């Protein structure tokens, strides 16, 4: 039995403005102009733009105190692009297949401690479970086996240091920022010992952490092809920073999505029944929990896609216009220095593209259904190339870990969905909120 609450959407703020100002409008936040682009055409242009035209780094610099210096948004564009390639190559099929047994082990250990009945908060369940999965798959066995509780504590301090004020003043002398800085220094101290053992050869492993430690930037060569500067590797602080990036990516978005998925399915009996039937057919036991079977669960993936459409983990996608000539969008020119923004809920709930836009209807992606073209079970593209749906971003910056999410969420939901039961939901309301509230995610546990 479960007690859940559904959520009725009100329109995200940009949608009413789109009806008044059409596909583009500009607001000012202090001295900064922010131009929003709404609609498939402008959004597709945003997604396809090269980094030299629309750059992330000036906008997301507030993350540097968390991720650290020398990586991601604190690195030159060419280095940043090489870093992204490292991540993409590490998330290939071979790498993901190796992660599935770790996901299984983590889930077995976590659910072993559950009793036969009681009340659970599914947001808390997925947050705890997925941070263990992420640390096990992305951080190496030394962390998961010895320090996982410490990493969870440090992660929450780092996450708590990303406040609305941080986006405007990341160095503001606040208690949250103080705890953030202390947590990052503690993370570096923990990982430096592990990295030293890896570099010395005392510990050897073919995992994600080792790939980051072994990474080298490309050599710089002159016109004749002669190496003028050898590519360097990451420092200990930069390795730690990348592990923090991966932990945020692996835990934050997946736990939010899994929680909303639970709330949606537990409130929609037909969709839940379809997913359970597919689970029992494709993954009836632990031995069947393979990479191919998990990614082949189209019913579950349609449910996840619909959940991501309604509740995208990231609300805004932002870039800064870099060319002196500005950015030409139709008849309009957005000047250099403007921040250009896309609002994921505004696109994902746009009634021009999504019939019955605020309803949870995974069936909309079935063959011959209204949004069939926006679902691609092979590439996990889900309408990104058309610019309709922004839950994973798009273009060169589409989320590199989306297949990782589509592996761990169905795997973990398999156990919880067989344990929890549905009942009549109560109504609640939500605007552009990416995290469910606590009481909206409580469920009564009743094991068979």
Image (spheres, grey):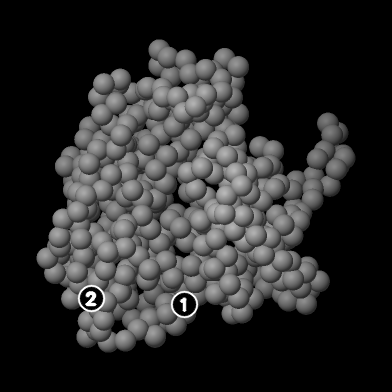
The x and y percentages for residue 383 are 34, 42
Whether residue 52 can be seen here:
yes
Residue 412 located left or right of residue 119: right
Residue 17 located left or right of residue 179: left
Whether residue 377 can be seen here:
no
Q: Secondary structure at mark 1?
A: helix
- Which numbered circle lies on residue 69? none
Residue 412 located left or right of residue 166: left
Nearer-N-terminus badge (1/2): 1
Q: What residue appears at the point 31 percent right and 70 percent down from the top-left corner?
A: 121
Kindly indicate the quadrant of the structure image that contains residue 140: bottom right
Q: Residues within 10 Å of mark 1 (few under 14, many from 20)?
A: many
- Which numbered circle lies on residue 106? 1
Q: Secondary structure at mark 2?
A: strand
Calculate the distance from the C-alpha at mark 1 to the C-alpha at mark 2. 22 Å
The x and y percentages for residue 221 are 82, 38
Q: Which residue is mark 2?
A: 444
Q: Of discs 1 and 2, which sits in the foreground?
A: 2
Q: What residue appears at the point 35 percent right and 65 percent down from the top-left corner?
A: 123
Q: Are marks 1 and 2 in contact (CB under 8 Å)?
A: no
Q: What residue appears at the point 35 percent right and 29 percent down from the top-left corner?
A: 38
Q: Quadrant of the C terminus?
A: bottom left
Q: In the figure, 446 relative to 372: above or below?
A: below
Q: Residue furthest left?
A: 424
């Amino acid at each position: 039995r479960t007690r859940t609450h559904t959520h009725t959407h009100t329109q995200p703020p940009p949608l009413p403005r789109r009806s008044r100002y059409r596909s583009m409008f500009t607001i000012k936040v202090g001295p900064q102009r922010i131009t929003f682009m709404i609609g498939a055409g402008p959004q597709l242009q945003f997604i396809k733009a090269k980094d030299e035209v629309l750059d992330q780094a000036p906008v997301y610099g507030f993350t540097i105190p968390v991720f650290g210096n020398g990586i991601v948004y604190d690195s030159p564009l060419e280095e940043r692009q090489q870093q992204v390639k490292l991540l993409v190559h590490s998330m290939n099929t071979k790498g993901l297949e190796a992660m599935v047994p770790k996901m299984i082990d983590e889930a077995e250990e976590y659910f072993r401690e559950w009793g036969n009945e009681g009340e659970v908060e599914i947001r808390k369940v997925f947050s705890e479970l997925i941070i263990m999965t992420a640390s096990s798959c992305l951080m190496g066995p030394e962390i998961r086996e010895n320090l996982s509780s410490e990493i969870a504590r440090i992660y929450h301090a780092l996450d708590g240091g990303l406040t609305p004020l941080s986006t405007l003043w990341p160095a503001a002398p606040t208690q949250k920022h103080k705890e953030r800085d202390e947590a990052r220094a503690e993370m570096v101290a923990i990982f430096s010992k592990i990295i030293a053992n890896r570099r010395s050869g005392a510990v050897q492993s073919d995992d994600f952490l080792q790939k980051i430690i072994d990474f080298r930037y490309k050599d710089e060569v002159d016109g004749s092809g002669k190496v003028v500067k050898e590519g360097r590797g990451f420092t200990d602080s930069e390795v730690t920073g990348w592990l923090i990036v991966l932990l945020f990516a692996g835990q934050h978005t997946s736990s939010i999505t899994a929680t909303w998925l639970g709330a949606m399915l537990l409130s929609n009996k037909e969709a839940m029944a379809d997913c359970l039937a597919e689970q029992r057919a494709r993954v009836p036991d632990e031995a069947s929990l393979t990479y191919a079977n998990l990614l082949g669960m189209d019913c579950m993936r349609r449910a996840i896609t619909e959940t991501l459409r309604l509740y995208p983990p990231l609300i805004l996608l932002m870039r800064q216009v870099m060319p002196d000539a500005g950015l030409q969008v139709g008849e309009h020119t957005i000047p250099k220095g403007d921040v250009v923004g896309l609002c994921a809920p505004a696109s994902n709930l746009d009634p021009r593209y999504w019939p019955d836009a605020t309803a949870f209807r995974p069936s909309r992606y079935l063959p011959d259904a209204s949004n069939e073209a926006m679902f691609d079970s092979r590439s996990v593209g889900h309408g990104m190339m058309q610019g309709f749906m922004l839950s994973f971003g798009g273009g060169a910056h589409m989320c590199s870990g989306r297949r990782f999410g589509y592996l761990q969420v169905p795997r973990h939901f398999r156990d919880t969905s067989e344990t929890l039961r549905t009942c009549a939901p109560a109504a609640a309301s939500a605007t552009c909120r990416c995290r469910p509230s606590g009481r909206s995610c409580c469920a009564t546990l009743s094991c068979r």
